[in-house]
Amino acid sequence: MGIGRIPIDWRVEKMKLSKDKTQLVYNDFLTIDGIPAAAFDYRLGTRSVLEWIVDQYRIKTDKRSGIVNDPNRADQPRYIVELIGRVITVSLQTVEIVDGCKKHCPSM
């Protein structure tokens, strides 16, 4: 249960980052605030890992087949929000490691 007997809604339909990327609107019930800018420095190709998660983890329906892709897990309702927390943590740690390596090996 949530606050005042209102059940917490962990389902995601489509997430959105704020323009300054410090907030992630997870759903109508939950906004994650205080995302460090450095979390976006760890990139896979042209996007940060967090931006990739925001883009991919949403409910979408294939136009041709009508198959619905729903990333929500009935058996693990907090899976996506916990994944976001882990992705932010790993991104920050990776950037810190890479920056440390650059100090010791300037040719990187």
Image (cartoon, rainbow, N blue to C red):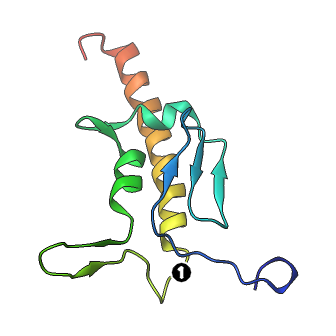
Q: Where is the C terminus found, in terms of image quarters?
A: top left
**Residue at left offset 33%, top offset 59%:** 56
Coordinates of residue 27 in the picture (x, y in percent): 58, 64
Q: Farthest left residue? A: 64
Circle 1 crowding by C-alpha within 10 Å: few under 14, some 14–19, many from 20: some
| Residue under numbered circle 1 | 77
Residue drawn at the location 51% of the way across and 31% of the way down = 38
On the rendered structure, is 44 left or right of 76? left
Q: Residue furthest top?
A: 106
- Residue at x 46%, y 69% (from the top left corner): 13
Q: Position of residue 83 (x, y in %)?
A: 47, 62
Q: Secondary structure at mark 1?
A: loop
Relative image position of residue 60 (x, y in whole percent): 31, 70
For image coordinates 47% across by 88% down, the residue present is 74
Q: Is residue 62 above or below residue 40?
A: below
User: In the figure, is residue 27 to the left or right of 60?
Assistant: right
User: 11 and 48: which one is in front?
Assistant: 11
Position of 13 with respect to 65 (left or right) is: right
Quarter of the figure with the N terminus? bottom right
67 vs 108, nearest the viewer: 67
